[in-house]
Image (tube, rainbow, N blue to C red):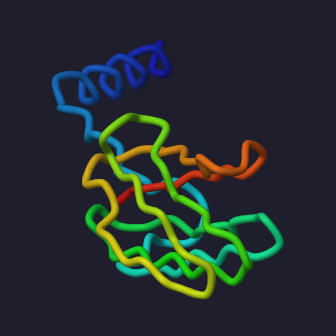
């Protein structure tokens, strides 16, 4: 009987308290950075780490032909990069994955991971 009373007292003491909300945990991987350089070489874009909204993106074309970095979402970004030249622009401010491609070379593609 004493065990039952103890359990009832403990159970009554636990009720009515507000539960704490879990802490927000960032996604796994490296933290986002405010500036990045994407290199184009041998008809490939280098991978990009996660970036912050509005990060400065520089694209360096090391190939002998013109390339583009064109968002798969029309109007988000679209830049031609002449051989041996660089282009710098601001990343989208929307959080998420932003795929892109080269409009001149069908097999070239990549994505920007924008997060906070």
Asked which quadrant contains residue 48, the reply is bottom right
Q: In the displayed structure, would residue 30 be above or below residue 69?
A: below
Q: Position of residue 21 (x, y in %)?
A: 28, 39
Residue in the foreground of this view, choosing between 23 and 10: 23
Q: Is residue 9 left or right of residue 70?
A: left
Residue in the foreground of this view, choosing between 51 and 64: 64
Q: In the displayed structure, would residue 6 be above or below residue 93?
A: above
Q: Position of residue 112 (x, y in %)?
A: 51, 56
Q: Residue at x 36, y 52 (%)?
A: 77
Q: Residue at x 65, y 50 (%)?
A: 104
Q: Position of residue 55 (x, y in %)?
A: 32, 72
Q: Is residue 116 left or right of residue 104?
A: left
Identify the residue at the far bottom of this view.
Answer: 84
Q: Is residue 32 left or right of residue 19?
A: right
Q: Residue at x 23, y 22 (%)?
A: 15
Q: In the displayed structure, would residue 45 be above or below residue 14?
A: below
């Amino acid at each position: 009987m004493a065990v039952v009373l103890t359990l009832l007292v403990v159970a009554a003491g636990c009720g009515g308290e507000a539960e704490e909300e879990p802490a927000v945990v960032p996604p796994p991987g490296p933290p986002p950075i405010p500036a990045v350089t994407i290199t184009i070489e041998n008809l490939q874009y280098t991978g990009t780490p996660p970036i912050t909204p509005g990060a400065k993106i520089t694209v360096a074309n090391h190939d002998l032909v013109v390339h583009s970095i064109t968002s798969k979402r029309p109007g988000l970004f679209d830049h031609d990069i002449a051989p041996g030249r660089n282009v710098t622009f601001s990343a989208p401010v929307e959080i998420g994955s932003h795929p892109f491609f080269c409009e001149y070379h069908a097999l070239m593609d990549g994505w920007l991971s924008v997060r906070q």
